[in-house]
Image (cartoon, rainbow, N blue to C red):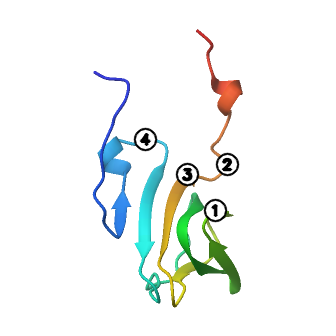
C-alpha cells in the first residue's frame, strides 16, 4: 500500500477530489462559473466550514445577505451556518478552489505536526 495518492484532472466546470484522492479529512473541489452565471441555490452546512481561493476571474459571494466582491488571489473562509451563493461577474468567468473541513477539527498544523527525520 502506498502512502500517497496522485491524480490528474480534466478541465471540467466542477471537479470533486474526495474520491479521486481518497480524502479522509477534507473535501476539495475546483469550480468554474462562466461569465454571468451563478450557483443556482443558496446553501449552508451542518458541520463543515469552507475555505475558498479565487484562482482567476472575478465575481461575488452573497453571505448572509452581505455582498462580497471576489477577484483572483482572494481567500475567504465561511462558517458552516452562513447562507452563501456564488456569482461570476457579467464580463468574466470565475474559477475557484473550495476546501471543506469540519469546523474546529484542526488540532495541530505545519511545524507542530511535523516529525523531523
Where 3 falls versus 47 (above or below)? Answer: above
Proximity of marks 4 and 2: CB atoms separated by less than 8 Å: no
Q: Residue furthest top?
A: 117
**Residue of label 4:** 24
Q: Earlier in the sequence, mark 4 or mark 2?
A: 4
**Residue of label 3:** 101
Q: Using the image as rendered, state which of residue 63 and residue 58 is in the foreground.
A: 58
**Residue of label 2:** 104
**Dot 1 crowding, Cα within 10 Å, few <14, some 14–19, many 20+:** few
Proximity of marks 1 and 4: CB atoms separated by less than 8 Å: no
Name the quarter where the C terminus is drawn.
Answer: top right
Image quarter for residue 86? bottom right
**Residue of label 1:** 73
Image quarter for residue 83? bottom right
Q: Position of residue 68 (x, y in %)?
A: 69, 79
Which marked residue is nearer to the observer: mark 1 or mark 2?
1
Proximity of marks 3 and 4: CB atoms separated by less than 8 Å: no
Amino acid at each position: 500500500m502506498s502512502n500517497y495518492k496522485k491524480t490528474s484532472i480534466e478541465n471540467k466546470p466542477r471537479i470533486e477530489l474526495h474520491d479521486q484522492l481518497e480524502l479522509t479529512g477534507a473535501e476539495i473541489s475546483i469550480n468554474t462559473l462562466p461569465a454571468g452565471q451563478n450557483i443556482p441555490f443558496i446553501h449552508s452546512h451542518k458541520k463543515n466550514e469552507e475555505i475558498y481561493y479565487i484562482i482567476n476571474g472575478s465575481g461575488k459571494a452573497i453571505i448572509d445577505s452581505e455582498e462580497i466582491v471576489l477577484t483572483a488571489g482572494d481567500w475567504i473562509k465561511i462558517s458552516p451556518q452562513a447562507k452563501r451563493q456564488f456569482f461570476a461577474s457579467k464580463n468574466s468567468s470565475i474559477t475557484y478552489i473550495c476546501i471543506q473541513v469540519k469546523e474546529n477539527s484542526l488540532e495541530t498544523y505545519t511545524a507542530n505536526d511535523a516529525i523531523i527525520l
